Image: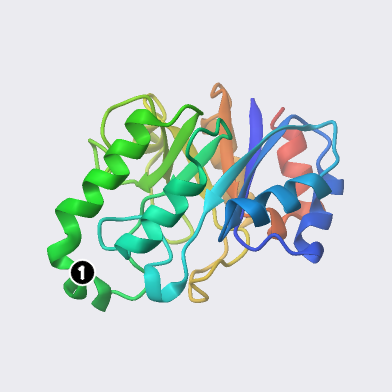
Amino acid sequence: MILSFFEEFPVEINLKKIKLINFPSKLYIASNSLRNFLKIKEQIKSKYIKEIIYWPTLEKQEGYWISPFSRTKALKRIFSELKNKKIPVMLDLELPFKKLQIIKRLFQFNKNKKLIYDFIKTYKGRVYTAEYFYSKKGFLSPNLKNKKIKMLYSSVHPFTKEFIKETAKNAIIGLGIIDKGIDKHNPILSPEKLKQELQILKQQKEVIIFRLSGLNKEYLKIIQESY
């Protein structure tokens, strides 16, 4: 199993946690531009990191996450930067951080959805899509070549063992959270709960934890015991 990590804020203090990783891993690194992502990627030196994936984020006023309710201009900017590239990309398909933007950009929905669909369909590199757990067919994501990641953050929503195992049949599972992201109100997953969920998913090729910055000796011990 590859035990990977999301990192929403890849500043120096958070990236230092890479030194704790001594098992096969991948990193999903958030950045507001491809240029900044590549600068961050150059700083990461570890033989255990098998792949570094670009996780594009927008400004809060643009929607922050990728959805048909994001600002059209922002989506075009992100997708234009990636034109003719083969860098692995993860689109975080969530509703806007500011929910009023759903109403504000309602009439842009179809246009923006097509932009997202066309990018996934035509992009030359690998595309991952992080999606809500409750959408069986994928949230705003066509059933194309994209690799789906289902966010089963049990510190926020409870999940049964059966639900986790069933969801894992068709998607990479995201676990967490072990450190808060842009939403400061979410509770933290206990080490004991993480251990239980890793045991459920021990046959999976990859599991992703949100997020790298929360990795400490206690979580690390549990992860190592899961291999």
Lateral position of residue 220 relative to residue 137, left or right: right
Residue 221 lies, with reference to residue 10, above or below; the image says above
Q: Is residue 132 left or right of residue 186?
A: left
Residue 31 in percent (x, y) is at 59, 57
In this rendering, does residue 186 appear at all?
A: yes
Residue 183 location, x and y as percent? 48, 72
Residue in view at x 80 percent, y 32 percent? 48
Residue that mark 1 sits on: 105
> How many marks are shown on the rendered structure?
1
Q: Nearer the viewer, residue 62 or 28?
A: 62
> In what quadrant of the picture does the C terminus appear?
top right
Which residue is at the far left? 107
Residue 172 as seen in the image, left or right of residue 223: left
- Residue at point 74% right, 29% down? 24
Q: What type is the residue that disc 1 sits on?
A: Arg
Give the quadrant of the N terminus. top right
Q: Dot 1: within a 10 Å radius of its alpha carbon, few (fewer than 14), some, or many (20 or more) residues? A: some
Does residue 189 sit above or below 28 in this rendering?
below
Instruction: Please state the horizontal and vertical placement of residue 35, each as a whole percent of the image.
Output: 65, 53
Is residue 157 in sight in this rendering?
no
Question: Does residue 90 lie above or below 108 as drawn?
Answer: above
| Residue 28 in picture, x, y percent from top left | 60, 45
Of residue 124 and residue 210, the one placed in the foreground of this image is 124
